[in-house]
Amino acid sequence: MKQDKFLIGILVFIGLLIVVSLALFFSRDRPQPVADDTPQGVVYNYLLALQEGDYEGAYAYLAEGPQKPSLPNFRNFYRQNVDFSSLAVEIGTTHFDADSAQVEIIITRLSNDPFIRSWDESGTALLVRQDGAWKIRTLPWQFWQWDWYEER
């Protein structure tokens, strides 16, 4: 009889741990867009939109130009080539020019292999000011198709 109460107590405790864990998981804060009046904000919102699958929203941050990809090509590139579940991105320093900016991006590749550590790569996003708004001209190769905005 005493063992039954002990076992029931353990099961109730495990059940409570499961309920609390699920509540914490589902109530965590989701990343929110920031003001896009700075180059850092544009890069952040662009990557956040891609991570959430909002390809139209991300596409709106691209600079206008003769080699700008079409929305279907843009969408297909990200669906086929970029896995955000294995990436973490940190936005670093920004260097301004008159109508252009360079934003440093540190990309951490997360490893699922217990024998391979995660590693960092750095790259630069180039932005230009078009019609008073910052627009992305290039990103590091992990997020960019090689022929976008390049003359053929």
Image (tube, rainbow, N blue to C red):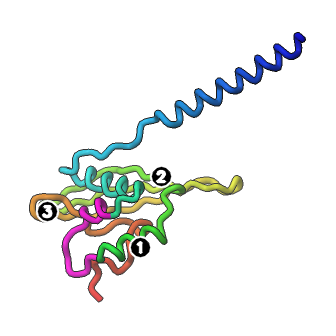
Residue type at numbered disc 1: Asn
Q: Which residue occupies 52% across, 31% down? A: 24
Q: Which label number is shown at residue 76?
A: 1
Q: Which residue is mark 2?
A: 88
> Which residue position holds label 3?
99
Q: Nearer the viewer, residue 129 or 36?
A: 36
The amino acid type of the residue labelled 3 equals Asp
Split into 4 quadrants, where in the image is the C terminus?
Answer: bottom left
Percent x, y of residue 28? 46, 35
Nearer to us in this view, 82 or 2: 2
Of the pair 92 and 14, the residue shown nearer to us: 14
Please rate how many residues cluster around mark 1, counting C-alpha atoms within 10 Å: few if below 14, some from 14 to 19, many from 20: few
Q: Earlier in the sequence, mark 1 or mark 3?
A: 1
Q: Is the Cβ of the residue at disc 3 closer than 8 Å to that at disc 2?
A: no
Q: Is residue 81 left or right of residue 20?
A: left
In the picture, measured across the screen, residue 118 lies left or right of residue 78, that is right
Q: Residue at x 35, y 56 (%)?
A: 49
Q: What is the magenta range?
A: 56-69
Question: As displayed, is residue 65 above or below residue 2?
Answer: below
